[in-house]
Amino acid sequence: MASDNVFVEHCKGINGLDKVILRETRGYSAEVYLFGGQVTSWKNEHREELLFLSTKAIFQPPKAIRGGIPICFPQFGNMDSLEQHGFARNRLWSVDPDPPPCSSHASSRASVDLILRNSEEELKIWPHRFEFRLRVALSPAGDLMLTSRIRNTGTDGKPFRFTFAYHTYFSVSDISEVRVEGLETLDYLDNLQNRKRFTEQGDAITFESEVDKIYLSTPTKIAILDHERKRTFELRKDGLPDAVVWNPWDKKAKAMADFGDEEYKHMLCVEAACVENPITLKPSEEWRGRQEILVVPSSYCSGHLDPRRVTFTG
Ligand code: TA6
């Protein structure tokens, strides 16, 4: 087991499940459960929680944890033969004893490397051998970075295909005051209309009812503006062309046992994903998909915000 230090602590979480706490000197922190390889908390320097975790979330494997950043692999949604969102979020990951060097995160003292391999049991439902290495890191500025490396370790010469998403639950003050910028005029598949294809209108996206859309070939940056908190989340993604936007609203909220009836008002999922065109990996090939989320203070004047004015650095 990797040794603890001020930046990384291995400990027990809810129901004794193993978790890792990452801390950065400015006070930012993140928590990652080995169950699901799932981030469940990301706090800023004021100890404010930035991710949504349902008060009714169940921490009992194999049930997926409702909130934080579940990982959908090897299948997003129910588009194929596996259970909804695949099995990675229902599995116990382990700490990677031999993580690959990572250039972009070399500076992250607060990071943990997890690994998931196929179980013999799994081969019966998904007959492919893989290695999934996940690095979760906090930058000195408190940005939360997730890097996934998936390798086809099969020796049968066969490729495999998968879809993927970081199913991020953002915590918001009031969903009716939130805007998403960066998805205007894009095509999307509407999950509420049998994945029929539509084109989004030209303005920022706002919310007044259930939404479940898969935006196709989006820009690499998306902004989630929380007016009331004068806070903007910037989502940057790499290797993940699509983005899913989801809010269950009132009816679906009531139908979910692990979700509070009113909690839809305080969360929004914006998910860096690869859905439309599944990834195919030949034996020994590796895919990398990265997401970085950061908080930028937003000076908001209704209707006039231009995401380019939000201090997107780099
Ligand atoms: O990402 C959006 C979505 O696919 C919705 O259709 C909704 O089902 C949501 O995921 C939650 O899925 P879950 O399996 O976690 O209940």
Image (cartoon, grey):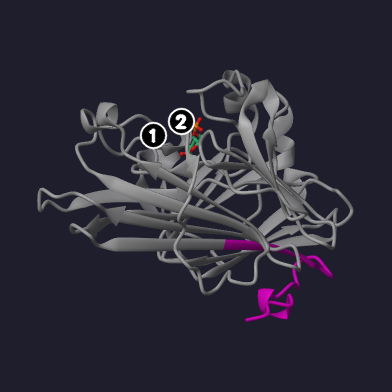
The local secondary structure at tag 1 comes to: loop
* Depth check, front residue: 273 or 131: 131
Q: Is residue 20 left or right of residue 202?
A: right
Give the percent coordinates (x, y) of residue 256.
58, 22
Residue 70 shows in this picture = yes
* Depth check, front residue: 190 or 243: 243
Q: Residues within 10 Å of mark 1 (few under 14, many from 20)?
A: many
Give the percent coordinates (x, y) of residue 91.
44, 32
Give the percent coordinates (x, y) of residue 198.
40, 55
* Depth check, front residue: 53 or 241: 53
Question: Which residue, as the protein is rendered here, is positioned at the far right?
Answer: 46
Quarter of the view holding residue 234: bottom right
Distance from disc 1 to disc 2, alpha carbons, whole Å, reads 5 Å
Quarter of the view holding residue 10: top right
Give the percent coordinates (x, y) of residue 127.
19, 37
The correct choice, above or below, for 265 with respect to 23 in the image is above
293 in the magenta segment: yes
> Could you tell me if the residues under marks 1 and 2 are in contact, i.e. CB atoms within 8 Å?
yes
* Residue on which disc 2 sits: 90
Q: Residues within 10 Å of mark 2 (few under 14, many from 20)?
A: many
Question: Does the beta carbon at disc 2 come under 8 Å from ligand 1?
Answer: no
The local secondary structure at tag 2 comes to: helix
76 in the magenta segment: no
Q: In the drawing, what numbered circle is on residue 87?
A: 1
Q: Name the residue: 34% across, 62% down.
A: 287
The correct choice, above or below, for 274 with respect to 195 in the image is below
Q: Main secondary structure of the magenta part?
A: loop
Q: What amino acid type should be assigned to the residue bearing mark 2? A: Asn
Name the image quarter holding the N terminus: top right
Instruction: Look at the image and give the residue range highlighted in magenta.
Output: 292-314
